[in-house]
Each structure stands twice: as C-alpha cells, then as structure tokens.
Amino acid sequence: MSAVLAGLDEAQTEAVLAPGGPVCVLAGAGTGKTRTITHRIAYRSLTGETAARHVLAITFTARAAGEMRGRLIQLGVAGAQARTFHAAALRQLRYFAPRLFQGRPMPELLESKGRLVSQAALREGVRLAGTAVRDVTSEIEWAKAMMIEASDFPAAATKAERELPIDAAALSSVYMAYEQLKRRSQRIDFEDLLRAMVWALEEHPDVAEQIRSQYRHFVVDEYQDVNPLQQRLLEAWLGGREDLCVVGDASQTIYSFTGASADHLLGFARQRPGAVVVRLERDYRSTPQVVQLANQVIAGASGQHAAARLKLVGQRPDGPVPRVVRCEDETAEAEAVAARCAELITGDTPASEIAVLFRTNAQSELYEQALAERGVPYVVRGTERFFERPEVREAMILLRGAAHAAAADQPLVEAVTDALSGGGFTPAAPPPGGAARERWEALAALVRLASDAIAAGTVAGTAGAGLPAFNDLLAGRATAQHAPTVEGVTLASLHAAKGLEWAAVFLVGLTEGTMPISYAQTTDHIEEERRLLYVGITRAKERLWLSWAAARQPGGRSGRRPSRFLPTDAPEQKATRATSFVASSPAKPKRGLPTCRLCGVALFDSTQRKLRRCGGCPPPEPDAELFERLREWRERIAAELAVPPYLILTDA
Ligand code: ATP
Ligand code: MG
C-alpha cells in the first residue's frame, strides 16, 4: 500500500484518495495524470474498495492500455480491464452476441469505409473524384461520432460550417446509401461498434445489468479528446452511477477534427455537482527549460482551451536549453537529426529514449533513410514504415508498369503523376483528416521524391531515362531500411506521441505550411495545430530540438519560414550540410559507407557523400531548375486556390 501512495505529491494523493464519486483531474502535460489514475485503481483495489475486476479503465491507444496494465501489475494489482473504447466495446459485444443477435453471428467489422462509400455514391448518381471519396468518408465518420443521422445531415452540416466536398444534400444521400449497403452486407463499422454497445446497454436491461454489475469503477485517461458517441457509451456503461474518474488537459485536445471536444472535460464539474476537482501543476517529466518553452508556446493560445490553460511548474533539475535549428533543406535537416541521434547513442542515451516526431507520417521517409544510412536502429510508431505502407507498395507496382508504357520524352514528374492517377490516384483537394490524409500525403511524398531525385541529378528528368532509375531508387530505399527492431529511435507523428515521453525529442519540419499544416485555415484549426506542437514539446524529458528547413531540397529556393509558433527568442542554431555539425559527428555509419544513389559505388569523399553521387555519375539534368520552378509555380497556384497539389489513392 505504501508503495502505491509513495511517489505521489499532495494533489495527486488527493485524487487517489478521493472517495468513489465523480473525480476530475485537470492538469497539464507531464504532471502525472496517467500515473495518478493508475495509482488510484491500485489503491482502491488493494484497500478492497473496488476489486480490480470491477474496474474499466479507458485509454486512448492500445499501447497506453498495455502500459497501464503493466504498471498495475508492478503495483501488485492484476485483473483490471484497461482498454480503448473500441476494444472494450468489441469485447463486450462479442460476449453478448448470442443474446443480442439472437443466434445469428455477430456482424463483421468493416475495416475501411472507402469502397462502400464509392458504391453508395455510384448508386445515388453522385460523382466523386478520388479525394472526394476520402472527404465524404471522413465526413460520414465525423457525423457518426457526433451522432448525426443521415437524414439530419444537411442542417447539422450547415451549423457546423463544414467545408463539404459535395453539397450537403448529396452527402446526406450518400451517407444514407452507405448505411443501407453496409447493413445489407452484414457489416458494422467502428462507430457502429460503439453505437451497438450503447444500444445493447440502453435497450437490453438484462445485458446492461450484467455489464454494470461487472464494471463499477470507471477511469478515463485523455478525456479532453472524447467524442459525443464515446461520451454516450460512457454514460450508458455508468447507467446513472457516478463512480467515474476522468483526467485530461484541454491544451492537449488534438482530435477535434474527428468530433472530439474538450467540452466534456471542461464541463465535467458543472454537470456533476459534488465532483471532486483536482488540479496538478507540477511537471515531473521535463526539465524547467522544456517546461518554459511549453508554457511559452501555449501562452499564445486563444479560445476556451486558453481559458482552461494550466501553467506548468518544472520539478526536475536544470537541463540543456531547447534548440531551434535552422537547416538549409529537408535532406540536411534529416541528416543533422540522424547525426545528432548517433551522437546521443554513442554518448549515454539509449536509442529507445530518443524520438523524432513529425506532423505528417509522410515525413518519416526522409528520417528512416537518414537513420538507416547512419546505422541507427529505429522503430516507426503508429504507422507502417513508409515503404511497407499499402499505398506506397501499390504505387511502386504502378510505376514499374509505367516504365514500359510512358512516352520516353514525357517529363518524369508528370509520368509519375499519370501513373498514380491511372491506378486510381487523382489530383484534387485534400481530404479532411485521418487515414485519408495520411495516404494522400504518402503519395505526395513519392511525387516529391521524384522531383528531388531529378534536382539532385540522381535520375533523368524524362520518363524514358528517368522512370527505370527512379524505380531502382525506390527499390533501393525500400530495402535499405532496417528490419524492425525492438530497441530503436522512435519515429512517430505528433498525434501518435500522445501520452508518451523520451529523454531526447526532435521535433522536425517546423515550417509554416507543415506546422501549422497548410490546410489549417480557420482560427480553431490553427489553434489545434498549436496544441499539437505543445503535445510534441512536452514529450521531452531532457533534450529538445526543434528544427526547420529553409528549402525543400538541396539547392532549392530558401523561401520557407519557420513555424509561427516557434518563439523568436529561442537560441537558434544553424545546421547546413557543410557545417562541422554533421561532419564532426563521432558516430561512424555502422552499416558501411553511404553509396552513390545512381550506381551504388561507396562514397569516401565528404562532398560526394553530401551529394550522394559519385564523380562518375552524371551531374544534375539541365531541366532540374525548370522542374523546381514548375513545382513552386504549382504550389503557389494551389495555395491561391486553396487546393494543395497532392494526389490521392481511391479505394475503387
Ligand atoms: P501527459 O499529459 O503527457 O499524458 P501525464 O500528466 O499523464 O502526462 P504522466 O505520464 O503520468 O503524466 O507522468 C509524467 C512523468 O512524471 C512520468 O515519468 C511519471 O512517472 C513522472 N511522475 C509523475 N508524478 C510523479 C511524482 N509525484 N514524482 C516523481 N515522478 C512523477
Ligand atoms: Mg498521460
């Protein structure tokens, strides 16, 4: 017992000891919210107040659930359920399926909505381009999480002032047809899973009674990101009881695009009179230097989240001042980060205590490459490794096909674009969020890779000569990446880094357009981007690097600006390919020297290493500059029209 209470401060202890009624812990990052609820479960279980088997703890990710179970076992408590909303609902639904579905098998889970949405659109005579399928899918997901029925969609959509890809009435009819097709194919989607559980609890008193007698004490971590549907399920589980403890930080709300809202957290005490509200301020995770930066970044926030802001007070000894690092281009940035990682590992920081965090998963490719070249092991979290992603594998097959079909003198970038379009990729506006966006960004990264390769002189600018070389380059990169390792530098998106911590954190790609992301246009959306950066900063225990690149590619126009969220008074350091910063890294590549991208010969000369091209291979194509200008022109026009120049994979 003493072990459970030892290691908790006064406010944390108050939350642990609060009797079983509504308890709300409002606190900033790193103040021990997750630790507090874990210890609360342990305390109540060990004192016999609530046996572990009667506990249902809801976490945001499966990994967080696993960590909580592990920590509970360390504290001597076994048998508590720690799961995500979906995992908990699925488990309960499976258990009660024979009763709920009257002997019929439980409907199968629909993993991806895209195909059915396309069919629904076809049936309704609504023309959807590639991206629009994604847009409509995300919109349906949002509506379902908000519990907006298809028939109510137009009104609700107008109210929410959502930028819809097609008119609201058409969207409503596609939504309705999607629901019908899904029902006919005996499937349920992820939102239905939660809805089905709500239905089971609200309409089947016997099931509700059994579940409610099993689960008596509820705990929800990351409560600031709960959506209305999840909240409804939580209420249904509770069935009017009040033994609920929620913890959250409004400054870390980063999923509003999926319908999540901090309102539930901020209104908790108002809705539950008598709730015990505990505020934690002491930051046990990060050095005062990191805490100061986090406070500074979030201090600029506006709106309701700002009102709920909790200032953090660092508890740890002093550490190094966070560095803002300016790099000449993205490749130099990745190389600088990889070099620094190698240096830290050679020092006393284990690879597993280092993370490289980025805004979009497509950014991971450059870092995978740079770390692999230095022989630094890494693990990609929350997404597959870039070249293992299905859309990237599919794209590589399409590109191999195009090598035989494209006109020899067609510009390479155009041929790549065409090849991807031919297989279902269509240039169009970006989808609003989630998996759709991720796929779209991965494909955009492939097209960028093609224009980078031309600019670097690695491949020729025409399809005839360039496409086979580009395919070789892709194949080479795909195999150069490391086999999965358990211990390694973590590569993750900021979203996937939620709740986690590392000794050293690199926040990369912090330019305007990436952070905040270009499609964040409204104040609300931009504020969410700020919170995302705040989440990133507060992942660091000791060392924090914030880097940005002035140009996208070597020799490109240095027109980029650093993220508006970066404080201007933070110490800035310059990192270019030529600085000693990269060259003086004590870490030698463990897997041999880098090789020429074109012919594969080992590169001994440092200039060659920087260019990743040997002396014998051809210099950049003369039209590289033209391509760069063309790309910039496209980006400018796209920005003016507010349609980023990306590509999208359809499900069709
Ligand atoms: P986030 O908002 O990022 O989810 P959190 O509030 O959940 O953060 P935790 O992850 O619970 O914070 O704790 C952050 C770190 O501080 C962990 O390493 C935890 O072990 C440590 N910690 C928390 N409370 C204390 C304490 N009282 N004494 C020492 N260390 C603590
Ligand atoms: Mg936490």
Image (cartoon, rainbow, N blue to C red):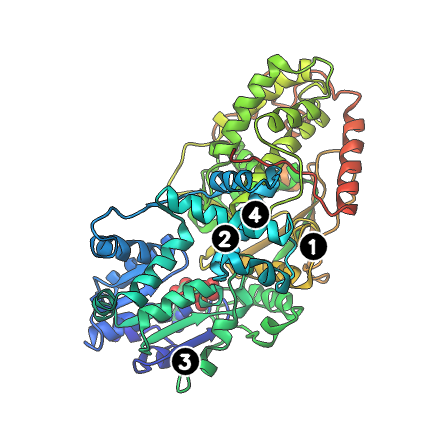
Locate residue 480, reporting x and y percent.
Answer: 49, 27
User: CA gap, disc 2 to disc 4?
Assistant: 9 Å
Tag of residue 374: none
Find the residue positioned furthest to the front. Answer: 124
Mark nearer the viewer, 1 or 4: 4
Upstream in sequence: badge 2 or badge 4: 4
Tag of residue 141: 2
Locate residue 252 relative to residue 510 in the image: left or right: left
Label 4 is placed on what type of residue?
A: Val
Q: Quadrant of residue 466?
A: top right
Question: Mark 1 packing: few (<14 Cα in 10 Å), some, or many (20+)?
Answer: some
Is the shortest distance between ligand 1 and the CB of mark 3 under 8 Å? no
Mark nearer the viewer, 1 or 2: 2
Tag 3 near tag 4, CB within 8 Å: no
User: CA gap, disc 3 to disc 4?
Assistant: 45 Å
Tag of residue 11: 3
Q: Tell me the residue that label 4 is attached to.
A: 136
User: CA gap, disc 3 to disc 1?
Assistant: 36 Å
- Quadrant housing the N terminus: bottom left
